[in-house]
């Protein structure tokens, strides 16, 4: 299949459990997935690179696999980032209009004003996400273009990240022969793939339950209200199972995936599971319900932590429903457990809004990878005019190229 140059988009999600490369082609009617490459990741801890060599190896393998499937050469990618060094806060910008009409220039300038805030020296601005515009005290405006007034204000949600944590990821990509198109906060990418417009409008908490991190993003009125990255995830469940049942973490992972359930009452009491002992290869017997009790305790603790975070930030009133995604959301019974904790409708979100190899990427594990190509397609496909027509979402991906260039010199 012949493709126009520039129509290829690659999303590279470098997670703590796996690296996944999603290759897509931008078509007139949307984004078509044409390839996927995945490889276990063991060079990161809690979303931070701790072993460059292992990370480079995993990226290289995932890219090679994706190239093979898509029958293309990959030279650059959009990458995701999520670690505890990500911070978010709201900032205001103001621009005097003195009776002028609001146009693209005015929108850009007021957003720039919101962006000019002091941030720690070791950090950089990753995203500037307009939440609402205010024209002469009239608030809640999503798109002020064409309006007239005396002063234009904007509330923006600013996401910053510690420069070194992105620098190391970029370094690993470079060593794998990849150029970086842009860096995007992982849960924003996941949200793009799994949420629908009504959920964003009514208020939704998207929770990406990964291996080493649990990421949260809250939307209300189609705007980002809050983001957080917590340093725990599915790997903690494996550690608990391994410790309590005297298993290797690899066996614990197998046990969790094959027999795990978040509601212990749903499995038969007294049911036994045979597992190989790590010490002597002998078969040991574990109690199925006990396995599920261990899983339930840890998953409930993680979800409770997220709920407390939302209560602490007074986000509770903004959230109508909860969407879970990421590999750990595969756990059976997790919707019911989460429903009892959040007291809201909960669903597990699979990546959507793409065509092509839909079945290949139909897993919550690939939400961030698919979201990266969707966000990239939106960025690439948007003319300046179209960006101004979508002032709340048009700047989702703030280019970090300038400081990335400085960082890796
Ligand atoms: N079928 C399953 N049942 C239960 N857990 C699962 C299943 N499949 C995957 N997982 C868990 O999902 C986790 C990995 O999720 P994911 O691929 O989203 O993480 P990641 O993106 O690599 O890591 P992170 O986002 O934390 O950096 C692992 O802990 C794994 O055990
Ligand atoms: Mg992830």
Image (cartoon, grey):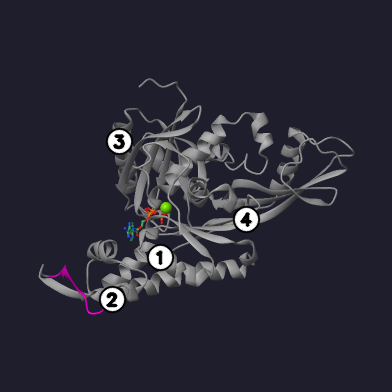
Q: CA distance from mark 1 to mark 3?
A: 34 Å
- Of residues 191 and 77, the one nearer the viewer is 191
Among the two numbered marks 2 and 4 on one chain, the one whose residue lies closer to the N terminus: 4
Among the two numbered marks 4 and 3 on one chain, the one whose residue lies closer to the N terminus: 3
Residue 64: which numbered mark, if any?
3
Q: CA distance from mark 2 to mark 4?
A: 38 Å
Q: Secondary structure at mark 4?
A: helix
Among the two numbered marks 2 and 1 on one chain, the one whose residue lies closer to the N terminus: 2
Q: Using a 10 Å C-alpha cutoff, classify the residue at mark 3 as few (fewer than 14 neighbours), some (14 to 19) or many (20 or more).
A: some
**Disc 2 vs disc 4: Cβ atoms closer than 8 Å?**
no
Any atom of ligand 1 within 8 Å of the CB at mark 1?
A: no
Quadrant housing the N terminus: top left
Residue 334: which numbered mark, if any?
1
Q: Secondary structure at mark 3?
A: helix
Residue sitting at x 39%, y 75%: 297
Q: CA distance from mark 4 to mark 3?
A: 41 Å
């Amino acid at each position: 299949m012949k493709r126009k140059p520039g129509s290829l988009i690659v999303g590279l999600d470098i997670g703590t459990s796996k690296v996944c490369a999603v290759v897509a082609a931008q078509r007139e009617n949307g984004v078509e997935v044409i390839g996927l490459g995945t490889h276990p990741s063991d060079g990161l801890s809690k979303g931070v690179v701790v072993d460059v060599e292992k990370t480079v190896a995993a990226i290289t393998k995932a890219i090679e696999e994706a190239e093979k499937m898509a029958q293309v050469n990959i030279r650059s990618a959009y990458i995701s980032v999520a670690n505890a060094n990500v911070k978010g806060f709201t900032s205001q910008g103001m621009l005097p209009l003195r009776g002028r009409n609001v146009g693209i220039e005015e929108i850009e300038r007021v957003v720039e004003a919101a962006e000019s805030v002091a941030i720690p020296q070791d950090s950089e601005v990753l995203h500037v996400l307009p939440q609402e515009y205010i024209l002469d005290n009239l608030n809640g405006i999503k798109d002020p273009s064409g309006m007239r007034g005396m002063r234009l204000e904007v509330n923006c949600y600013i996401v910053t990240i510690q420069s070194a944590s992105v620098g190391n990821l970029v370094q690993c990509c470079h060593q794998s022969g990849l150029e970086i198109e842009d860096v995007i906060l992982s849960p924003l990418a996941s949200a793009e793939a799994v949420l629908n417009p009504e959920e964003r409008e009514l208020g939704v908490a998207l929770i990406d339950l990964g291996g080493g991190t649990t990421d949260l993003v809250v939307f209300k009125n189609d705007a980002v209200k809050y983001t957080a990255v917590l340093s725990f995830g599915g790997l903690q469940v494996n550690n608990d199972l391994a410790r309590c049942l005297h298993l290797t973490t690899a066996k614990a992972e197998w046990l969790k995936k094959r027999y795990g359930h978040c509601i212990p009452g749903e499995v038969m009491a007294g049911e036994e599971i045979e597992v190989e002992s790590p010490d002597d290869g002998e078969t040991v017997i574990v109690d199925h319900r006990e396995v599920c009790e261990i899983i339930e305790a840890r998953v409930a603790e993680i979800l409770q932590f997220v709920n407390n975070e939302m209560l602490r930030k007074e986000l509770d009133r903004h959230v109508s429903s909860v969407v879970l995604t990421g590999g750990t959301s595969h756990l059976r019974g997790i919707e019911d457990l989460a429903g009892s904790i959040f007291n809201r409708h909960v669903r597990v979100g699979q990546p959507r809004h793409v065509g092509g190899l839909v079945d290949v990427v139909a897993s919550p594990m690939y939400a961030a990878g698919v979201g990266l190509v969707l966000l990239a397609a939106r960025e690439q496909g948007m003319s300046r005019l179209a960006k101004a027509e979508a002032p709340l979402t048009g700047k989702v991906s703030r280019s970090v190229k300038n400081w990335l260039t400085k960082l890796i010199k």
